[in-house]
Image (cartoon, helix red, strand yellow):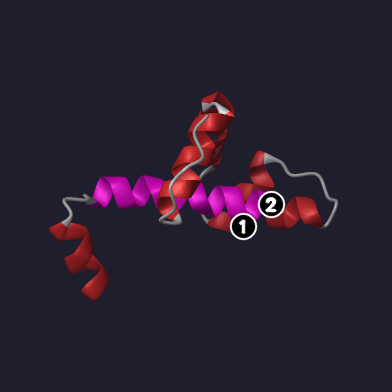
Amino acid sequence: MPIVRILLRFGITWREVSELTKRVYVEVAQQDYAERRRPVNTSRLAVMTGLTRKEVRRIRDLEDRIPSALREYEQAQAAGKQPHCE
């Protein structure tokens, strides 16, 4: 329960938490499965994450469109670090 109180205090909605969690599930499943040198496809990720294939496809397509600089910024923010800016 404490995490929910913190999220609410900072104005983070369930929709935002849900979307972020889905993205993280897909990303981690993709990385873990790729480390085993096996092909990673939408169906396999759907089974691993419990998401629908449609949802996995949407998230993967979204990730493909996010520039790497933005992705690095988001990761730095999540880790509580200042991103490196040139």
Instruction: Say if residue 10 shows up in the picture.
Output: yes
Residue 48 bears which disc, if any?
1
Q: Secondary structure at mark 2?
A: helix
Q: Nearer the viewer, residue 85 or 51?
A: 85
Distance from label 1 to label 2 (Cα)?
12 Å
Q: Amino acid at mark 1?
A: Met
Give the mark toward the camera: 1 or 2: 2
Say which label, 1 or 2, has the lower sequence index: 2
Residue 21 sits inside the magenta stretch: yes
In this rendered view, identify the residue nearer to me: 61 or 74.
Answer: 74
Task: Please name the residue shown 65% across and 40% down the image.
Answer: 42
Quadrant for residue 5, please give it. Answer: bottom left
Residue at (52%, 28%) from the top-left corner? Answer: 66
Taking the image as shown, residue 71 lies to the left or right of residue 5, namely right
In this figure, which residue is indicated by the disc labeled 2?
Answer: 31
Q: Is residue 58 visible?
A: no
Front residue of this view, candidates 19 and 46: 19
- Residue 24 in picture, x, y percent from top left: 50, 51
Q: Quadrant of the N terminus?
A: bottom left
Residue shown at the point (16%, 50%) measured from the top left: 11
Give the extent of the magenta segment.
14-30
Q: Check disc 1 and report its element: helix, strand or loop.
A: helix
Where is 11 relative to 67, above or below?
below
Q: Is residue 34 magenta?
A: no
Q: Residue furthest bottom?
A: 1
